[in-house]
């Protein structure tokens, strides 16, 4: 069979399927599928304003939050960080780096029944505390861990 004909038929079939989905109202052009962006919190220039932006001010310290990150990060551009909590009803986990220009690094929303675990790679400008804020059961909790960033990546 002619390869060009086969490619044309595949493309026409896909386009027809999308057109039917739009006509049926299943797809809406320009529809936003992600949660609304918290612009004020992500653009905050200090920790207090960033916490206020995610409604995390006045958070209680908790031993039920575990931050896993290296003690010394040899490359501040790629620091692996994970946050785990066993708190029932955890609905949101936010990660902050105190000394970054914009302290709020990530804000995760957990759906019902989700495990209280997130992992990502973050950028750190210099040695700082990595802080996790967890919302669970209508209350806000926090934990911190210091991560040292070496200059030049030599581990010293």
Image (cartoon, rainbow, N blue to C red):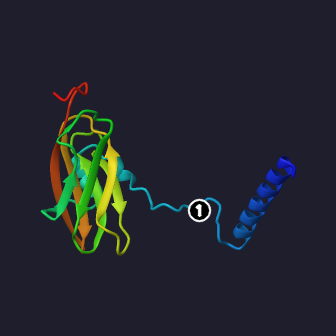
Residue 2 lies left or right of residue 114; in this view the side is right
Q: Locate residue 147, reporting x and y percent.
A: 18, 41
Residue 134 vs residue 12, the one in the foreground: 12
Q: Residue at x 29, y 45 (%)?
A: 80
33 lies above or below 98: below
Where residue 86 sits, quadrant-wise, is: bottom left
Q: Locate residue 154, reporting x and y percent.
A: 22, 26
Residue 21 lies left or right of residue 130; in this view the side is right
- What is the quadrant of the C terminus in the image? top left
Q: Locate residue 148, reporting x and y percent.
A: 17, 37
Q: Residue at x 70, y 69 (%)?
A: 21
Where residue 11 sits, quadrant-wise, is: bottom right
Judging by the rendered image, the residue that carries numbered circle 1 is: 31
Q: Locate residue 150, reporting x and y percent.
A: 20, 30
4 lies above or below 54: above
Residue 94 lies left or right of residue 20; in this view the side is left
Q: Residue at x 24, y 61 (%)?
A: 84
Which element is circle 1 on? loop
Q: Label 1 neighbourhood size at 10 Å, few (<14), some (14-19), many (20+)?
A: few
Q: How many marks?
A: 1
Residue 82 vs residue 58, the one in the foreground: 82
Where residue 71 sits, quadrant-wise, is: top left
142 lies above or below 152: below
């Amino acid at each position: 069979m002619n390869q060009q004909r086969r490619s044309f038929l595949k493309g026409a079939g896909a386009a027809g399927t999308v057109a039917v989905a739009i006509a049926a109202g299943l797809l809406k052009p320009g529809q936003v599928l992600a949660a609304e962006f918290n612009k004020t919190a992500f653009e905050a220039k200090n920790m207090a304003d960033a916490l206020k932006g995610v409604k995390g001010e006045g958070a209680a310290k908790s031993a039920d939050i575990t931050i896993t990150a290296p003690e010394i990060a040899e490359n501040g551009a790629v620091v692996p960080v994970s946050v785990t909590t066993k708190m029932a009803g955890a609905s949101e986990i936010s990660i902050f780096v105190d000394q970054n220009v914009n302290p709020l690094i990530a804000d995760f929303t957990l759906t019902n029944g989700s495990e209280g675990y997130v992992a990502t790679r973050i950028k750190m400008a210099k040695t700082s505390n990595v802080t996790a804020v967890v919302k669970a059961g209508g209350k806000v909790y926090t934990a911190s861990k210091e991560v040292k960033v070496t200059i030049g990546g030599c581990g010293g």
